[in-house]
């Protein structure tokens, strides 16, 4: 299907260029912070086991941030080349960023739900949590989040194909690329799930606060607080702006709506900031990594993971000198 004409005036094109020039540095910064967070998680076996879900959350945020950078760069170049013209909905998937947007929006929301669910179980069913929420189960839940986000992408491509006879804006947002029906379906999840995650974290935090007479629950309270902060910021910086973006131009016209993608970029950088501030071992590992190990001497970072019992066993083992010949 051929779609001709440019749906924007010269003034509108100038505004699009200025806006997308802002997307590039914001998206690049958010991508860099999430890449750094992923590197910290992958740096040791201990970090992978403890913060694997955080690494997956950062990966999702990184995809969305990279999509914003790519979209900003390509849109500017298309306007300069006079190729920023209307095209079919399905042709929008010839652009790379709709793939990044869909997976990068859905994956973090699923991960936030998983993180909140784990904290609720850990607070109210601690024995069940220690018995059944094993490293294998954590890996399975992480893989499930990835598969669900890929499924949402495939559904989006299908709906885009169904709307292949519809001409749309060359901006190629998620709604432009998939059609209004799937765009609403997609926004429903990326708005609703962070709210659910926030409610679950509030419940877990309240319970941990009430049960914090034991040392174990005090430690759990810190974990719940981190998850609560991530969910709250996702609601403020991601879910609420997506509501405005979804209805922009149809139900309301908010002047600053096009700038809300930069709020999402800000939310993408929050994971690294939150864990650096609230998790000592993560902070120490981060400083050691960015200093190429130079700061390790100051933080006295352990080489591997050893439980207290294991360390005692190692320390109590006597080493016999070799027999003299």
Image: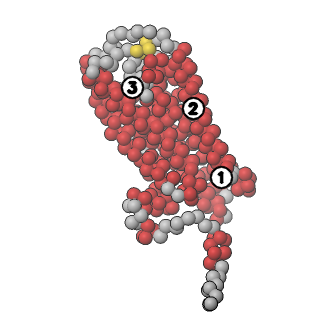
Residue nearest the viewer, comparing 315 with 206 = 315
Q: Nearer the viewer, residue 137 or 275?
A: 137
In this view, the mark in front (3 or 2): 2
Q: Which residue is mark 1?
A: 135
Q: Is residue 214 above or below residue 136?
A: below
Residue matched to label 3: 254
Image location of residue 154, percent across then percent down:
57, 26
Taking depth in this image into account, of 192 and 205 the one nearest to the observer is 192
Q: Mark 1: which secondary structure?
A: helix
Q: Is residue 145 above or below residue 302?
A: above
Residue 109 horizontal side relative to residue 290, left or right: right
Q: Name the residue at 48% across, 54% down.
A: 40
Q: CA distance from mark 3 to mark 1?
A: 46 Å
Mark sitting earlier along the chain (3/2): 2
**Outermost residue toward the front in this view:** 325
**Classed neighbour count for the residue bearing mark 3: other residues with Cα under 10 Å, few (<14), some (14–19), many (≥20):** few
For the residue carrying disc 2, how many other residues have a C-alpha within 10 Å: few (<14), some (14-19), or many (20+)?
some
List x then y, in percent, for residue 164.
49, 13
Name the image quarter holding the N terminus. top left
As displayed, is residue 3 above or below residue 210? above
Q: Quadrant of residue 147?
A: top right
The local secondary structure at tag 3 comes to loop
Which residue matches tag 2?
A: 150
**How far apart are the alpha carbons under marks 2 and 1?**
23 Å
The answer to which image quadrant residue 172 occupies is top left
Would you say 309 lies left or right of 166 here?
right
């Amino acid at each position: 299907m051929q779609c001709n004409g440019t749906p924007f005036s010269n003034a509108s094109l100038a505004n699009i260029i200025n806006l997308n020039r802002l997307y590039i540095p914001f998206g690049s910064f958010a991508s860099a912070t999430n890449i750094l967070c992923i590197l910290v998680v992958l740096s040791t076996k201990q970090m992978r086991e403890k913060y694997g879900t955080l690494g997956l959350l950062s990966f999702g945020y990184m995809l969305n941030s990279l999509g914003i950078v790519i979209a900003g760069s390509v849109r500017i170049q298309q306007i300069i080349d006079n190729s920023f013209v209307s095209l079919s909905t399905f042709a929008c998937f010839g652009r790379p960023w709709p793939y990044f947007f869909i997976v990068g929006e859905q994956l973090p929301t699923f991960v936030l739900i998983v993180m909140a669910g784990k904290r609720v179980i850990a607070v109210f069913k601690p024995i069940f949590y220690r018995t059944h929420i094993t490293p294998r189960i954590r890996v399975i839940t992480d893989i499930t989040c990835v598969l669900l986000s890929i499924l949402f992408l495939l559904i989006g491509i299908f709906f885009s194909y169904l709307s292949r006879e519809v001409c749309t804006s060359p901006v190629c947002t998620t709604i432009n690329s998939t059609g209004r029906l799937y765009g609403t379906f997609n926004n429903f999840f990326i708005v609703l799930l962070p709210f659910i995650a926030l409610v679950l974290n509030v419940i877990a935090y309240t319970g941990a606060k009430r049960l914090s007479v034991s040392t174990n629950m005090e430690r759990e309270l810190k974990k719940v607080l981190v998850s609560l902060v991530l969910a709250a910021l996702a609601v403020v910086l991601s879910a609420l702006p997506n509501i405005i973006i979804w209805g922009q131009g149809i139900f309301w016209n908010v002047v600053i709506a096009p700038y809300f993608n930069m709020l999402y970029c800000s939310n993408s950088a929050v994971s690294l900031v939150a864990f650096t501030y609230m998790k000592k071992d993560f902070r120490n590992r981060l400083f050691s990594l960015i200093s190429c190990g130079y700061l390790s001497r100051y933080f006295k970072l352990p080489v591997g993971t050893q439980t207290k019992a294991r360390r005692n066993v190692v320390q109590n083992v006597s080493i016999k000198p070799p027999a003299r010949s």
